[in-house]
Image (tube, rainbow, N blue to C red):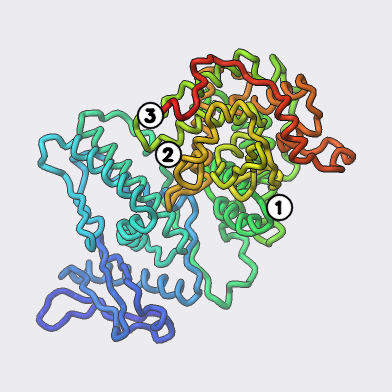
Amino acid sequence: MRLRLVRPMVTKGSSTPHFVKRIPSDIRDVLVGRKLVIPVGEEVVEFAVTQSTQSIRFSLRTSDPTVAKVRLAEAISYLEQYFEALRSHRPVELSHRQLHALAGDFYRAWSQGPDGMKSLTVVPSTGEVIEGPWADDDEAELLAAVSQQLADKAEQGGTEYRRRTYGPVVDRILAQRNVPSVTPSSRERLIDTFSTYLTKSLATSSRIAAGDYSGDPLLERLPQWEPPTPATKTHEARQPKSNDQAVSLIGLVDAWWSEAKVLGKSSSTYESYKNSFTLLSRFLGHDDAKRVSPENIVDFKDHRLTSVNPRTGKPASPKTVKASDLTAFKSVFDWAVSNRRLPKNPAVGVTVKLGKKIKLRERDFTDGEANLILSAANAVDLDAEPRRSFKTRQMKRWVPWLCAYSGSRVGELVQLRKADFRQEGKAWIMQVTPEAGTVKGKEYRDIPIHEHLLELGFIDYVREAKGEYLFMDLKPDAVFEGVWQSKKNRLSEFVREHVKDPNVAPNHGWRHTFKSKGFEAGIQEKVLDALCGHAPTSVGRSYGSVTLKTKVDALAQFPRYAVDPKLQRPLAEQE
């Protein structure tokens, strides 16, 4: 059923035309309880549909007949799209590019400083209002304070607060762009993106209010809005997609992940793949997977190998391009071909030939480097402010020692929980398990705690630690992978302050060091593999398990690290 409206209706006693149309009977039940946000000129009208509502009715907010006809046509077009989306049960899935374009338009409007700002009611229901320009003498300080206050509230209030606070604004933005219905996940992501850009825009306006009119690099990176492909009707949903219908690159990764996670793929793989596809989309300047050619993949590969990353000061390594980017493309595009999303895989046959890496030193730490790191770990001030970084400081204090005496991966140690420690006889055991987060190979393993760690007071910290995780605080709305990766980065930066040689990995170097010192102590390679979580090098070595007793005996042979004795204080003495 299509809307039919020939001319606007003028109510009795009023010169302002109104939009009036009966609600289509086939979707009336679906509409009940919804609040429609309908564009009318430069503004929007909110119309709540209740059980007794028979017609959609609102003022066109003009007495000019010509303007009224234009607004009437816009309202008809919008509602037609909205009703078709409801009939098809296929709301729009916004791409990563579209999310940032929508939120970016708001950023553009609110990052121009006090001269260019307008007033905005963020949430009428909660009374939180941001208005501008302000008459306050120090506009820069006030803008900065509002930006920080909103950022704090968004972080403390979590998903529910952001949904309640910014949901109505996001609905208006969608309505003004004639996007009638989006998926719940798209709406949530847009709300989060909007929240971030709002605080950024106010911070930028604060800088301008203080007299700093320098260029804004974020504005240069924001994409332009590209309307989504209209939804199809229900009976057309299972028909083959037309050749000219776009397939989102970012959406393709999300679709692949919905199946891959059931098959046991790790969330870190998903994040890595998504990052590669995001970089590809930015490089190409579009988000359509069907427009990607083999030549595009080759050009992207060459771009990654030659373009300097401003954060690292050097281009991506051939190993990264091959193992991360090209592997991501081949895997996801293969899945897309198998699932009839794409006709062919544009990444097939594209590769990077890896030459033998120049070796300038051993990959393990020297005794001097190891002692520098462990001495720095002992010297971490656990009582420093702010208190919110307490677990990060505890991580810097203990994870280097755990690496030194276990050979474990940093990610496995950062995610340790209190529940992962137990005592068997006189030995304390640490369990590395996929239940805690990410473990390569998806297999648990038990690792005895070295006696030196016990003397340093590590188990005291385990007993006294607050919360489930020893080194992470996970708020209700926090994404585990984001917090986990952030902690690993902080630890890497900490080690780099003391070991600056780029030819040794700041975190992974401990695994090589552990193996080397284990060999020196006469510990069997199979036992060291079991402690580190390395796969057996042959079928024969996979037979027979390394018992916990064998591991305990092996760690008793593992040599102690000699660091500044004044820094080897038990936890109780530090408090």
Q: Is residue 468 left or right of residue 153?
A: right
What is the number of the mark on residue 383? 3
Q: Is residue 566 above or below residue 112?
A: above
Of the residues shown, which amino acid type is indicated by label 3? Answer: Asp
* Residue name at image x 30 percent, y 81 percent: 50
The amino acid type found where label 2 is placed reads Arg
Check disc 1 and report its element: helix, strand or loop. helix
Q: Residue at x 42, y 29 (%)?
A: 382
Q: Quadrant of residue 189?
A: bottom left
**Counting residues from the N terminus, which is met first, the one under dot 2 or under dot 3?**
2
Residue 273 visible in the current orientation: no
Any mark on residue 334, and which? 1
Does the rendering let one see residue 93? yes
Cα distance in 3D space between marks 2 and 3: 41 Å
In this rendering, is residue 249 above or below 453?
A: below
Q: Amino acid at mark 1?
A: Asp
Q: Using residue 527 as the reference point, say whether residue 573 is left or right of it.
A: left
Q: Quadrant of the C terminus?
A: top left
